[in-house]
Amino acid sequence: MTETVNVEVQAVREGRWWVLHITGGGTTQARTLTQVEAMVADYVGLNRDVPAGAVRVTITDIDPGAGLGGALAAAREAQADAVRAQEQAAVKVRALAKTLRERGLSGAEIAIVMGVSKQRVSQLTAAATPQVSNAQAALTSKLA
């Protein structure tokens, strides 16, 4: 059985091509980002004498060129900020719903106060499930 070869790649847009800088040495190119994995796998396979199918490619950095790197970084940061803000808002909303419940308001009353459905009140006042927390963590890490 052939061992898997892991390679990391930086993709830089130059004109109509993506220049692919392979960590550890080597450069190739692709017309589109969807072709990166195949092109790098072929390149590494030929140069390291391993089957292309045994090469795992990870794109570690993408520079869209034309001075857009800063805009890309700013957009990613804005997305991460939005996720953090949403998480903080969710904590506050759950805390408020639970506090209102503890103070004796019914689910229907809490729904009216908060402007949500009675079903949403039930969700907000229920104990958090690990599935939800794991899903939020996964989303946060993807956007970071």
Image (cartoon, rainbow, N blue to C red):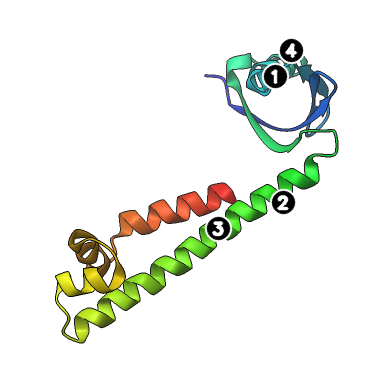
Q: Which residue is mark 4?
A: 46
Cα–Cα gap, marks 4 and 1: 21 Å
Cα–Cα gap, marks 2 and 1: 23 Å
In the rendered structure, which disc, 2 or 1, sits on the residue that comes first in sequence?
1
**Crowd around label 3: few <14 · some 14–19 · many ≥20 (10 Å):** some
**Crowd around label 2: few <14 · some 14–19 · many ≥20 (10 Å):** few
Cα–Cα gap, marks 3 and 1: 29 Å
- In the image, what residue type sits under mark 2? Ala
**Crowd around label 1: few <14 · some 14–19 · many ≥20 (10 Å):** few
Cα–Cα gap, marks 2 and 3: 12 Å
Q: Which residue is mark 2?
A: 74
- In the image, what residue type sits under mark 1? Thr
For residue 32, which numbered disc appears in the image? 1
Q: Position of residue 24 (x, y in %)?
A: 80, 33
For residue 77, which numbered disc appears in the image? none
Q: Nearer the viewer, residue 130 or 112?
A: 112
Q: Position of residue 78 (x, y in %)?
A: 64, 54
**Crowd around label 4: few <14 · some 14–19 · many ≥20 (10 Å):** few
Please indicate whether residue 43 sits to the left or right of residue 26 in the image: left
Mark 4 secondary-structure assignment: helix
In the rendered structure, which disc, 4 or 1, sits on the residue that comes first in sequence?
1
Please indicate whether residue 121 sits to the left or right of residue 53 in the image: left
In the rendered structure, which disc, 4 or 2, sits on the residue that comes first in sequence?
4
Q: Residue at x 79, y 47 (%)?
A: 70
Q: Which residue is mark 3?
A: 82
Q: Nearer the viewer, residue 81 or 21?
A: 81
Cα–Cα gap, marks 3 and 4: 44 Å
- In the image, what residue type sits under mark 3? Ala
Q: Nearer the viewer, mark 4 or mark 2?
A: 2
